[in-house]
Amino acid sequence: MNFSKLVPSVFYIDIADGLKLFVDCLKFTIEHQDLNTSQPYCVLSKDGIRIMVFQDEQLAKEHYPELRLETNNIEEVFTEVSFSHPHLLHPNLSKVTKRPWGAKEFAILDNQVGIRFQQW
């Protein structure tokens, strides 16, 4: 058995919130969008990572995912995100911090998703 990628599905009450986070802030691109259906969704990608973002009020109210994105240059990511979207910085991890397990991390949070950025 062989797997090559994990593609998470993230649910929002309003898909526009997800696009603000992933496209506007993190610079993912929209590979596919189907926004004029009863369950709007987009396939987003960046650097070989894919995420499915759906608009589904019921599932959004049940799921609050936390994702981790690894990087080789956390200072660069932090500088860009904190400059362009400082309101998204997580209050408990708003600066690059070396964690007890050895990774450097910071986090952002919108109304649905938490994202930790890590550099090992």
Image: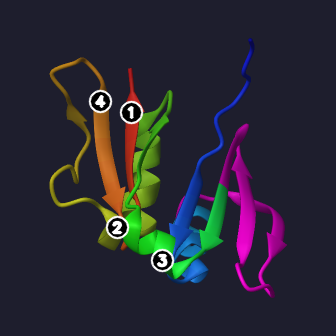
Name the spot of residue 108 as percent of width and height, x first.
34, 57
Q: Give coordinates of residue 110: x percent, y percent.
A: 37, 69
Q: Nearer the viewer, mark 3 or mark 2?
A: 3
Specify the amino acid type for callout 3: Gln
Residue 41: in sight, yes or no? Answer: yes
Q: Is label 2 in contact with label 4 (beta carbons under 8 Å)?
A: no
Instruction: Provide the residue designation for mark 3.
Output: 58
Q: Which residue is mark 2?
A: 88
Q: Which residue extends farthest top? A: 1
**Mark 3 element type:** helix
Q: Position of residue 57 (x, y in %)?
A: 50, 81
Mark 2 and mark 1 lie on one chain; the one further toward the N terminus is: 2
Judge from the rendering whether residue 117 lies leftward or rightward of residue 103; answer left or right: right
| Dot 2 and dot 1 residues touching (CB under 8 Å) | no
Tell me which label, 1 or 4, sits earlier in the chain.
Answer: 4
**What type is the residue that disc 4 sits on?**
Lys
Query: Looking at the picture, which amino acid does disc 2 mark?
Result: Leu
Mark 4 or 3: in front is 3
Quadrant where the C terminus sits is: top left
- Element type at marker 2? helix
Structural distance between the alpha carbons of marks 4 and 3: 35 Å
The residue drawn where x is 54% and y is 83% is: 14
What residue is rendered at 48% in x and 77% in y?
58
Tell which circle, 3 or 2, labels the residue nearer the N-terminal end.
3
Earlier residue among tags 3 and 1? 3
| Residue placed under numbered mark 1 in the picture | 118
- Give the CA separation, mark 2 to mark 4: 18 Å
Q: Are marks 3 and 2 in contact (CB under 8 Å)?
A: no
